[in-house]
Image: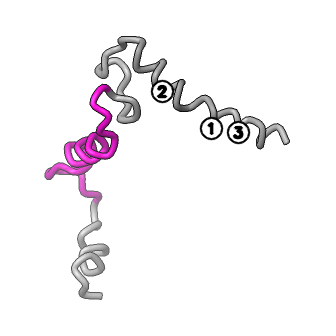
Amino acid sequence: MIQEAIAIVLKKIRPQAVNLIELSGISDHVITSAVGNKYGDIFEQQLEWAMTSRMNTPGDNIPPKFMEYMGPILHGKL
C-alpha cells in the first residue's frame, strides 16, 4: 500500500518538481542529465550523447574477437 501511495504522489508532484528544478538556475554543465535540460530536447540529447560516446567512436574500443564471433551475426552471414 505504501508503494502504491508513493507512486500516486510522485505522479501528482512530477510536473511541479520538474519546473522547480529548472527554476534553480543550475547550468546544464553542472547537472549532466538529458531530462529537464533547458532546451527540453530529451531524446535528441540522449542520441547525441550516444553517438559521441567514446564507446561508439572508432579505435581500440572493440573487444578482442568481437568481429570474429559477432561479425557474421551482424552482417547476416550466420
Badges 3 and 1: C-beta atoms under 8 Å apart?
A: yes
Instruction: Kindly state the secondary structure of the residue where label 2 is placed.
Output: helix
Badges 1 and 2: C-beta atoms under 8 Å apart?
A: no
Q: Which residue is mark 1?
A: 11
Q: Which residue is mark 3?
A: 8
Q: Earlier in the sequence, mark 2 or mark 3?
A: 3
Instruction: Kindly state the secondary structure of the residue where label 3 is placed.
Output: helix
Question: Gap in Å between the C-alphas at discs 3 and 1?
Answer: 5 Å
Q: Earlier in the sequence, mark 1 or mark 2?
A: 1
Instruction: Kindly state the secondary structure of the residue where label 1 is placed.
Output: helix
Residue type marked 1: Lys
Q: Is residue 33 above or below residue 27?
A: below
1 drawn magenta? no
Q: Is residue 19 left or right of residue 69?
A: right
Instruction: Classify residue 65 by image quadrant.
Output: bottom left
Q: Is residue 71 above or below residue 49?
A: below
- The image position of residue 67, as x and y in percent, is 24, 70
Q: Which residue is mark 2?
A: 18
Front-most of 49 and 23? Answer: 23
Q: Is residue 34 left or right of residue 47?
A: right
Q: Residue at x 21, y 48 (%)?
A: 51
- The image position of residue 33, as x and y in percent, is 38, 31
Q: Is residue 10 above or below residue 63?
A: above
| Residue located farthest toward the right when viewing the structure as drawn | 1
- Highlighted range, magenta: 38-63
Q: Residue at x 41, y 15 (%)?
A: 23
